[in-house]
Amino acid sequence: MTEHPIRTGGCICGGVRYRITGPIKQIVVCHCRECRRQTGHIMASSDVWNHHFELTEARDLGWYRSGPKSRRGFCKTCGCSMFYKVDGGEKTSFAVGTLDDGCDGGIRIAAHIFTAEKGAYYDLDGAPAYPDGSDSVPMPPRG
């Protein structure tokens, strides 16, 4: 069995904290209008299987219904953008900037999505780019 580092993360004020006990997906950077508006730029996120994800502090966690089948989690006190979930989905997307370890351990940007909606004021790096929301970055085994 492969050992995975236990990762922790949270918002700026500490009102939302989480713990990840399993593998995480390589980073996908989203350039869609909603992510750009939510963060003020782009959203660098990773995914984790729900059974490897635990909220350890949720007193300030709020959810915004961002689509008919999706919602975005944020801290109601400091405003930190944190999570994205599809209703009934098996994984949780989290903003990698909220990790305490700065995403150490070989996790890197693997793809850019919704590049058709990206801002004109910046360029992409060399990672594969997809004009729509699909990417070819696989989820790690469920572990």
Image (cartoon, helix red, strand yellow):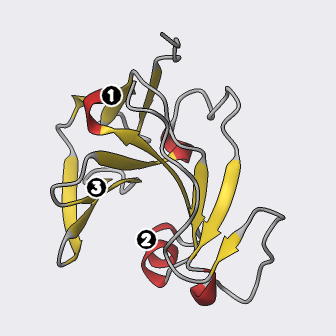
Task: Please identify the quarter of the rendering in which residue 14 is found.
Answer: top left
Does label 2 or label 3 sit earlier along the sequence?
2
Please state which amino acid type lies under the numbered disc 3.
Gly
* C-alpha separation, residue under disc 2 versus residue under disc 3: 11 Å
What residue is rendered at 51% in x and 53% in y? 45
Is 74 rendered above or below residue 42?
above
What residue is rendered at 39% in x and 21% in y? 21
Which mark, by number, is residue 73? 3
SS at badge 3: strand
User: Pointers 2 and 3 in contact (CB under 8 A)?
Assistant: no
* C-alpha separation, residue under disc 2 versus residue under disc 1: 26 Å
36 and 77: which one is in front? 36
What residue is rendered at 77% in x and 79% in y? 122
Which mark, by number, is residue 17? none
Residue matched to label 1? 52
Does label 2 or label 1 sit earlier along the sequence?
2
Whole-percent x and y of residue 88?
A: 15, 55
Whole-percent x and y of residue 128?
A: 73, 66
Does label 3 or label 1 sit earlier along the sequence?
1
SS at badge 2: helix
Looking at the rendered image, the disc whose residue lies closer to the viewer, 2 or 1, is 1
SS at badge 1: helix
Please state which amino acid type lies under the numbered disc 1.
His
- Asked whether, in this view, residue 135 is left or right of residue 21, the answer is right
- Asked whether, in this view, residue 58 is left or right of residue 47, the answer is left
Residue matched to label 2? 38
- Asked whether, in this view, residue 11 is left or right of residue 130, the answer is left
Whole-percent x and y of residue 70?
A: 24, 68
